[in-house]
């Protein structure tokens, strides 16, 4: 997965300077000049101002210039941000210049976010926001909210991030600030992109393009197109990706926007990498790398260096690949970028596996697995969190409108009472009619609440049945392996078995732990669908990538049984489905195929394109099943536990979970099997069309 670049506010002062004080000539500055030219212009203005007779460092214009220079230094001289912001803050506080103080606080926040100190960054942005609200400065409020939202997204607090963006969008609409509307809508699109909800992300980007056209600034449009290029690359639409990124590159090169140009070059390299053209990918990565030598943008370097590592790996230059992937991994660790660390760990795993260094390969595979599990758990919550947050925000707006309407109705009621004295008989008649209407509404409301109570009772009964099912599975399939593990540890602790004997049990213990982990993952997913209801959020899903990721995850298990895992899926196998749910289906079916296939067997994954669907098949050369077993496979209430060819244990829960997930995505699942010949599990999913519908 590529990353999209958030929009920071680094160009707010110069276009508004207009006529400068102390008799200077009129200063014209077109919006968003090249960063270096803008920085030099500000430094020149500061020098000229300081050379004027009677100059005071505490002049508000001088403070504004210091804050603006601090913003321009970002990605070039990071430490200068801290120095300039300290000067601006001290001068502002000495003359009670609140706007300058707020801008300086934003500068501190920018410095600490680039250093990976999330706690300090949030604290300074929050102070700036509070100050902006106190002095009712909408531009300071919007700048602080935008940066706060981005910082919360970095630490995974998507609810707070979305709240700040939505409140910022409301304020920008009220103040007709189209520039901030464009920035914040694009950053909301980035949130959806981070969750792989590309349909929603593209919908927001297209709205941002309209705003940018109204603003008439080609640089704003180029920034948006570069992010859209990254999204199109992720969903496999490489021609659209290349068109957008080439269009943005020409603008950035013409205006000298170095940090965005570096990002665009890196994205172009990513597009070639996804197309299998490693040499061309490396060429554009190197162009980006040369620009990064003059920038201080650690977040951008993670994706760049890891991309270079993947390109060199594809060219069989493992040593160089390891160097770049390791550099990217170090940076991601320092600034606590979990997604970056995960992707780098995956690359390093492949590098060491190619080199035959299986100990290092296993280490990075475990890191990748751990981060994948953590991020997967987080991803399960993010979409729901964002939806709930958006709904709560909309509800607050509706409540506010309702409250205003209520107050207006109250005022009108007073007027009506005064007029009612003149029309007393008419009022009495209206009151009687209104009373009857209220009584009717109350009766209807009572009936509705009675139905709601009956529905809640049924849901409670279902939850109790689900609870009993969960405890039954936990007692049946988790307590045994855990008890055996505890018993073995007790024997070793009491000296009843020797160290060598204990080590001899390690393979079995590892298998038991893998079984417990897999079972818990299925239990948590199944429990969520039964008790809370799983929300299906369809998007464009590349099945070949999902299958490849799961083959990578299960390769060690297959290798232990000398089983070959083969995928015949190609990059055009695109479905309209929920990525997380279908990932669970594929993982369970491949895991089951490995479980019931004897050593030296083979598991094959293939797909057939139908009229409006893809039919995916997972075939094994295992022990097969009789008809009685087949009929019980997909029953959710069944508690049948089966054992694999190496006595691998299962819960009987995985296939019922697969059935539920496939059906939620408008598909069907079935099995064909013969004893001692193997089994083939088939399931269908809707094909991805060119015109996608918006999701909720």
Image (tube, grey):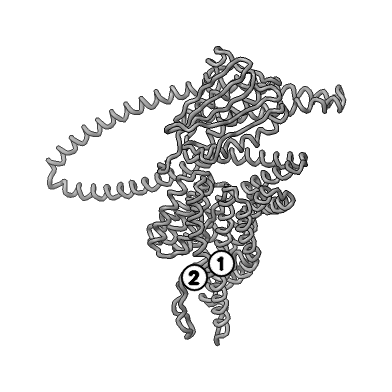
Residue 517: x and y, percent?
A: 66, 30
Q: Is residue 517 above or below residue 260?
A: above
Residue drawn at x 47%, y 44% as measured from the top left: 389
Q: Secondary structure at mark 2?
A: loop
Asked if residue 121 can be seen in this view, the reply is yes
**Mark 2 residue crowding within 10 angstroms, few (<14) / some (14–19) / many (20+):** some
Q: Is residue 21 above or below residue 259?
A: below
Q: CA distance from mark 1 to mark 2?
A: 10 Å
The foreground one among 426 and 389 is 389
Mark before the other along the chain sequence, 1 or 2: 2
- The residue furthest bottom is 53
Would you name the residue on which mark 2 appears? 13
Q: Secondary structure at mark 1?
A: helix
Residue 386: x and y, percent?
A: 48, 44
Asked if residue 533 can be seen in this view, the reply is no
Q: Is residue 202 left or right of residue 310?
A: left
The quarter of the image holding the C terminus is top left
The foreground one among 268 and 639 is 268
Would you name the residue on which mark 1 appears? 71
Residue drawn at x 72%, y 49% as measured from the top left: 318
- Residue 539's disc is none
Residue 653: x and y, percent?
A: 57, 23
Residue drawn at x 60%, y 55% as measured from the top left: 280
Say if mark 1 contacts mark 2, CB within 8 Å. yes
Residue 291: x and y, percent?
A: 62, 64
């Amino acid at each position: 997965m590529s990353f999209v670049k958030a929009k920071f506010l680094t160009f707010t002062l110069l276009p508004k300077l207009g006529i400068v004080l102390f008799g200077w000539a009129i200063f014209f500055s077109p919006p968003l000049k090249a960063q270096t030219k803008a920085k030099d212009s500000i430094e020149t203005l500061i020098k000229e101002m300081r050379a004027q007779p009677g100059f005071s460092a505490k002049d508000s214009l001088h403070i504004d210039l210091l804050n603006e220079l601090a913003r321009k230094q970002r990605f070039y001289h990071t430490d200068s941000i801290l120095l300039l912001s300290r000067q601006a803050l001290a001068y502002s506080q000495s003359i009670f210049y609140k706007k300058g103080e707020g801008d300086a606080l934003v500068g501190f926040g920018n410095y600490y976010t680039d250093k990976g100190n999330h706690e300090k960054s949030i604290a300074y942005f929050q102070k700036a926001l509070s100050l902006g609200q106190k002095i009712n400065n909408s531009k300071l409020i919007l700048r602080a909210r935008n940066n706060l939202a981005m910082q919360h997204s970095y630490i995974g607090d998507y609810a707070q991030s979305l709240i700040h963006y939505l409140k910022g969008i409301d304020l920008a609409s009220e103040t007709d600030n189209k520039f901030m509307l464009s920035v914040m809508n694009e950053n909301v699109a980035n949130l959806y992109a981070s969750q792989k909800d590309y349909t929603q992300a593209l919908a927001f980007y297209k709205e941002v393009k309209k705003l940018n056209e109204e603003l008439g600034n080609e640089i704003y449009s180029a920034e948006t197109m570069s992010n859209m290029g990254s999204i199109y690359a992720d969903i496999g639409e490489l021609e659209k990706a290349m068109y957008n990124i080439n269009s943005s590159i020409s603008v950035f090169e013409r205006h000298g926007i170095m940090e965005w140009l570096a990002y665009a070059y890196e994205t172009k390299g990513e597009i070639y990498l996804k197309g299998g053209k490693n040499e061309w990918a490396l060429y554009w990565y190197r162009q980006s790398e040369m620009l990064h030598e003059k920038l201080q943008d650690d977040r951008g370097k993670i994706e760049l260096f890891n991309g270079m590592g993947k390109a060199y790996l594809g060219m069989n230059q493992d040593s160089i690949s390891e160097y770049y992937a390791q550099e990217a991994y170090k940076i991601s660790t320092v600034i606590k970028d979990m997604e970056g660390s995960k992707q780098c760990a995956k690359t390093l795993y492949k590098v060491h596996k190619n080199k035959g260094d299986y100990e290092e390969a296993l280490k990075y595979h475990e890191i990748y697995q751990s981060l994948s599990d953590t991020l997967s758990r987080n991803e399960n919550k993010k979409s729901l969190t964002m939806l709930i947050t958006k709904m709560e925000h909309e509800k607050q707006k509706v409540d506010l409108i309702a409250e205003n309407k209520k107050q207006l109705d109250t005022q009108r009621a007073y007027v009506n009472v005064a007029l009612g004295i003149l029309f007393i008989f008419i009022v009495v008649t209206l009151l009687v009619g209104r009373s009857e209407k209220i009584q009717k509404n109350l009766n209807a409301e009572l009936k509705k609440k009675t139905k709601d109570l009956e529905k809640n009772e049924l849901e409670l009964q279902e939850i109790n049945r689900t609870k009993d099912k969960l405890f039954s599975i936990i007692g049946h399939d988790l307590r045994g392996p855990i008890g055996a593990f505890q018993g073995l540890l007790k024997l070793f602790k009491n000296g009843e078995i020797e160290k060598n004997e204990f080590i001899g049990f390690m393979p079995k213990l590892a298998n038991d732990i893998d079984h417990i982990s897999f079972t818990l993952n299925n239990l948590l997913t199944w429990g969520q669908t039964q008790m809370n209801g799983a929300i299906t959020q369809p998007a464009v899903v590349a099945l070949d990538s999902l299958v490849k990721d799961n083959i990578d995850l299960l390769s060690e298990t297959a290798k232990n049984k000398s089983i070959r895992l083969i995928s015949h899926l190609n990059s055009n196998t695109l479905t309209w489905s929920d990525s997380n749910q279908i990932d669970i289906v594929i993982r369970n079916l491949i895991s089951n195929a490995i479980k019931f296939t004897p050593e030296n067997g083979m598991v094959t994954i293939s797909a057939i394109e139908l009229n409006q669907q893809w039919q995916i098949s997972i075939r094994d050369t295992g022990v097969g099943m009789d008809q009685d077993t087949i009929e019980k496979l997909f029953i959710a209430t069944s508690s049948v536990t089966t054992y694999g060819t190496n006595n691998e244990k299962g819960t009987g829960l995985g296939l019922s979970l697969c059935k539920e997930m496939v059906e939620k995505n408008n598909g069907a699942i079935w099995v064909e099997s013969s004893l001692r010949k193997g089994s083939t599990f088939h399931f269908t999913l809707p094909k991805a069309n060119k015109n996608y519908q918006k999701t909720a």
